[in-house]
Amino acid sequence: MQRPILWIHGEALGPANPALQAYPGQPAVFVFDAELLAGRSPTTGDPAGTAPQAVSLKRIGFLYECLLELPVSLRHGDVVAEVLAFARAHDADGIVTSAGTDPRVEAICEALEQELPVEVLEPEPFVELDGRVDLGRFSRYWRRAEREVWAAAGSEQ
Amino acid sequence: MALAWADQPGDLPRHFESRQALEAELRRLFPAAEGNLSPIRGGRRQAEALLGRVQPARYAKGRNFLDGPVTRLSPYIRHGALSLAEVRDAVFARLQAPGGGGRQAGEKLINELGWRDYWQRLWQQLGDGIWRDQEELKTGHHPGAYSPDLPADVGEGRTGLACMDGFIAELHETGWLHNHARMWMAAYLVHWRRVRWQAGAQWVASSFSHKSYFFNRGNLERYSNGTFCRSCPLSEQGCPFDTSYEQLEAELFKPLPSVRSVESGRRERSAPRSSGPSAALSRPARRR
């Protein structure tokens, strides 16, 4: 990609965002997701629940204050439509973002890909674990993870 | 921070005279959002200030106390103002500095960061299925025994219990709860009030555990330094948490084996509370 725009989402509102690190200075956009803020997405609401709860002003304010310290344009509405409009306005040839934990991030990337190439960058992990990780209990995960995380600490000394 | 590209029509504002002006603008932009701005400010600068105050050894000793030296970093990590890897590296650097205490001083804090990584991995693996029960409940009750909705008195912070109402007030005011308060409140909702964990999780938009964590008054009083019990109208009579773990386990999780076993030594404590004035103050009905 020669002229990408960056899509910043709510899991990476800091300078460690790998898209900001890989493409410093490129136009970047964050969209306040109308569906999510209304409490109608599984990010904040039980899909089987009957009463969606809108996201509070406290959380919106927290996000907004994080965003004011980042080089990013702010929009409100449908994320896919707003990111694509931003890309068109900047004559972009692709979109770069960071991988998220929330499945909603991946779903949005798939929709964006219908229009433009999307590059998804992985943030630095807390601990590198190869292969399948048994998450049946925290203790099983931690038996492996603890060893690796402290081994990494030792290698930096 | 100024942008290197031109604004477009419909861009949201990035410059505010004050926090008050930001709050007013957010009310206009997001009329469905309830509440006020939190005293907890967002942003990297604030996150770095908090990170600079982290003391791993003190954290390990005092983190369970409500006034203990917890990091308060969770919202910043949740939204990536700080990454978990950055926090990990900052903790390692502190441990390795002169007087930092080395690995032993940092094991608890690194373990707690591990919990966050674990939940993230689990969310990634389960996707939206994270909202479903992953295993059979360990409380002995059928899932249908739990209410799908948050009781109004809980949502409004008028349960009559000074501790729970205090936690709810803090949640409303700041959007943040100490980990121990969150666990007490989750246990109260799920076990005493028989509310589905999903209703509580949606309420605070955080993940409540549906495991059978529970607590008693001694535990709560110790780690809150008695703050709530001193002012609680139910402190002298009717506190639903004021009993042994053994007794609570029998009441909350197991079907009543027989009326006789209750009468042999337990009746004295549970009888006065079973006819409490409101659902908030009484224990849940037992089921066979």
Image (cartoon, helix red, strand yellow):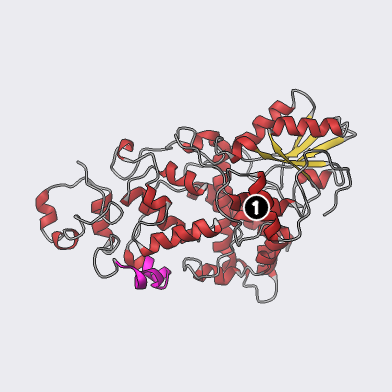
Q: Is residue B81 visible?
A: no
Q: What chain letter is assigned to the residue under label 1?
A: A
The answer to whether B81 appears left or right of A6 in the picture is left
Magenta residues, start to end: B220-233
Q: Residue B180: percent from the left, percent from the top?
A: 45, 61
The residue at 66%/58% (across/down) is B87
Dominant secondary structure of the residues highlighted in magenta in the image:
helix
Residue B266: name its quadrant: bottom left
Task: In this rendered view, identify the residue nearer to me: B70 or A89.
Answer: A89
Residue type, mark 1 in image: Gly
Magenta-colored stretch includes residue A92: no
Task: In this rendered view, identify the residue nearer to me: B184 or B27.
Answer: B27
At label 1, counting other C-alpha atoms closer than 10 Å, the crowd grade (few under 14, some 14-19, many 20 or more) is many
Examine the rendered structure and indicate whether residue B189 appears above or below residue B130: below
Residue under pointer 1 = A61
Q: Residue B211: percent from the left, percent from the top?
A: 39, 47
Examine the rendered structure and indicate whether residue A81 appears above or below residue A122: above
Specify the quadrant that holds the N terminus of chain A: top right
The residue at 10%/58% (across/down) is B264
